[in-house]
Amino acid sequence: MIFGRAFEKIKQGLAKTRESFGKAIHAVLTIGRKLSIEDIDRIEELLLSADIGVEATSRLIEGLKRDYKDKKVEKPDQVLDYLKAELKRQLGAAPPGLTFAPSPPTVVMIAGVNGTGKTTSIAKLTRHFASRDRRVLLAASDTFRAAAIEQLAAWSQRLGVDIVHHRAGADPSAVAYDAVDAAVSRKADLLFVDTAGRLHTKVNLMKELTKIRTVIGKKLPGAPHETLLVLDATVGQNAIAQAKAFHEAAPLTGIVLAKMDGTARGGIVVAIHQTLGLPVKYLGVGEKAFVGALFAS
Ligand SMILES: Nc1nc2c(ncn2[C@@H]2O[C@H](COP(=O)(O)OP(=O)(O)O)[C@@H](O)[C@H]2O)c(=O)[nH]1
Ligand SMILES: [Mg+2]
């Protein structure tokens, strides 16, 4: 049931991909004509261009060829049904939503390259949980630019939740430390820790994330309970490389895939799930405030 709902949300998020993909499949297979082996090759190209990834694509194509030989799949609609069922089966196992700490606060660290949608995703998550009577606290650990702190502070005001911040250039770990302290003393249910996506070098960035994580864990054993990486769905396969680099610095527990509304290559959701073995916990489908925020739970 929950998985069914999660899949529905993923489907909504994939609307653009689905539309262009469905059209392409129908273009490959003229109605009425039977499927040929060349058509299957074309479909393989389509899957790759939707960024479903090499691994997932070859698995899908193998299955399709098998069903084609068995004469189970011969028409465009059957191809689409087969792909839908197969993708549903593959994505269905993703655990939906956040995993909460046994006792509050649940600390959620948000990482990702600059501009992927970290702060916007935190705002959406905050609104989602605050409107369900969870006490949310924000930590402005992206201290790299003053504007980043101001952006998060603006959201905290709009959403009526507290924020812990220091000045620009301050130690992000010190902010996280104070925020965990505040989350405990103010009995917050959830603490979202915003982090920088760009430092002077990538090595610095990864070191910083490791340090923030360590400091959080020292202050509150077991925390962070979630380390979510925000990826921009419009960058395609590059997102996988980003995820691998971050995963090494701060072991990730899941992915937030933002900007699904802006791409027809949403197959990346499958590729991420399969290559990284990480659940895609949330899909972002809107840049305006919260419109269309999709949650898998
Ligand atoms: N279309 C679309 N734009 C988004 C989404 N999430 C974030 N954005 C936009 O992406 C830009 C960068 O977002 P921001 O949250 O500041 O990224 P950060 O640097 O990772 O914190 C902003 O213009 C956002 O409005 C989304 O789901 N869909
Ligand atoms: Mg930001």
Image (tube, helix red, strand yellow):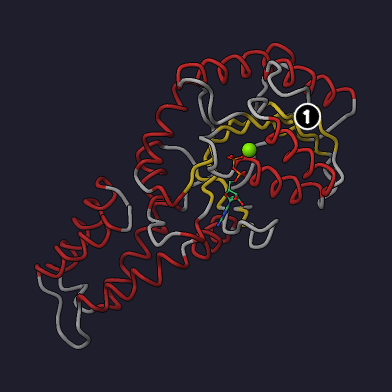
- Outermost bottom residue: 32
Please state which of residues 209 and 171 is positioned toward the viewer in this rendering: 171
Q: Which residue corresponds to mark 1?
A: 105
Residue 208: image location, x then y, percent: 57, 17
Residue furthest to the right in view is 186
Where does the image place residue 256, in percent across and percent down from the top left? Answer: 55, 44
Give the structural element (helix, strand or loop) at label 1: loop
User: Which residue is nearer to you in this view: 8 or 23?
Assistant: 23
The amino acid type of the residue labelled 1 equals Pro
- Regarding ligand 2, which quadrant of the image does it lie in? top right
In the image, is residue 223 above or below residue 115? above
Q: Which residue does the image show at 89% across and 22% down from the upper left?
A: 185
Residue at image position (36%, 70%) is 20
Q: Quadrant of the N terminus?
A: bottom right
On screen, residue 151 versus residue 49, left or right, reads right
In which quarter of the view is residue 33 placed? bottom left
Is the residue 211 above or below the residue 287 in the image?
above
Nearer to us in this view, 142 or 52: 142
Direction from residue 255 to residue 87 in the image, left or right: left
- Residue name at image x 59 percent, y 53 percent: 296
